[in-house]
Amino acid sequence: MVRKNQLPQFPNDYLNEKANEYDSSKWMERNQKRSTLLSIQYLFDKKLNDQEEDGIERGDSFLILDLGCGTGFSSEILIENGYKVIGIDILPDMILKTREKKKTLKEKKNLELILADINYLPIKTNVIDHVISISSYNFITYGKENYGEKVKLLGETAKYLNKILKKRGRIIIEFYPKDDHELDIFNKSFINNGFEGFMVKNNPMQKSGQTFLLLKKS
Ligand SMILES: C[S@@+](CC[C@H](N)C(=O)[O-])C[C@H]1O[C@@H](n2cnc3c(N)ncnc32)[C@H](O)[C@@H]1O
């Protein structure tokens, strides 16, 4: 079962039957869609602008990279909001469900899906307007137990995200670090690789749990 009060385990909670349960959970759908809508608001957060001309406009038809697109709840909301989307996921069981949903979308031409690892993105440099990642980014260090290995991988991934983004590109990540130490290494991977920004938590004192990173190319 996808449980409400427990953080899911990657990859076991997204394989076979678990992928079906995830996709048919109304609670999960609501949550993913709510976090995606909030992330769209954060994309245009004026606090990310150093100067007026730094701002990006809501009406523009951006190409958004949805990192860890899962079964497509977030991609669906991005498409409904008028964006073109490239969804990336590492698990066939999850992304195949997005592929099925794509057939029913009115704007299906606006969604491209790629089975790939966020850490090794098959995307050319300077082509993506913005990146959004909902409830996926904390899994990307899966298999790396050692602190040094995690820092290296996160740094390399952030560096490549910087390369694929166009000028003024922004990244909004909603994720669930398990403690303040983990939050710090994820945040620093961006700050040390050409991004600036800030984070938003439900409670400013919290050391883990739902956190949004709001970043732009510096
Ligand atoms: C909570 S789910 C997906 C949430 C998604 N926003 C949605 O609307 O369904 C997290 C996803 O992250 C994916 N994921 C985890 N590590 C990944 C990686 N290294 N590269 C690509 N996808 C990854 C998992 O396969 C899983 O589908």
Image (cartoon, rainbow, N blue to C red):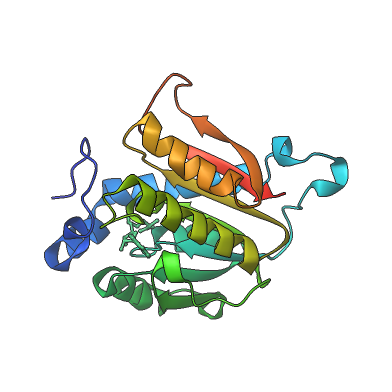
Residue 49, picture quadrant: top right
Q: Is 92 left, or right, of 110 in this rendering?
A: left
Residue 42 appears in the figure: yes
**Foreground of the two, 167 or 143:** 143
| Residue 47 drawn at (x, y percent) | 71, 35
Q: Which quarter of the frame holds ligand 1? A: bottom left
- Residue farthest to the top, as pictured: 205
Looking at the image, residue 12 lies above or below residue 110: above
Residue at the image position 55 percent from the left and 81 percent from the top: 109
**Foreground of the two, 212 or 26:** 212
Residue at the image position 24 percent from the left and 53 percent from the top: 25
Q: Is 163 left, or right, of 88 in this rendering?
A: right
Looking at the image, residue 61 lies above or below residue 194: below
Residue 125, picture quadrant: bottom right
| Residue 190 drawn at (x, y percent) | 56, 48
| Residue 136 drawn at (x, y percent) | 37, 54
**Foreground of the two, 11 or 29:** 11
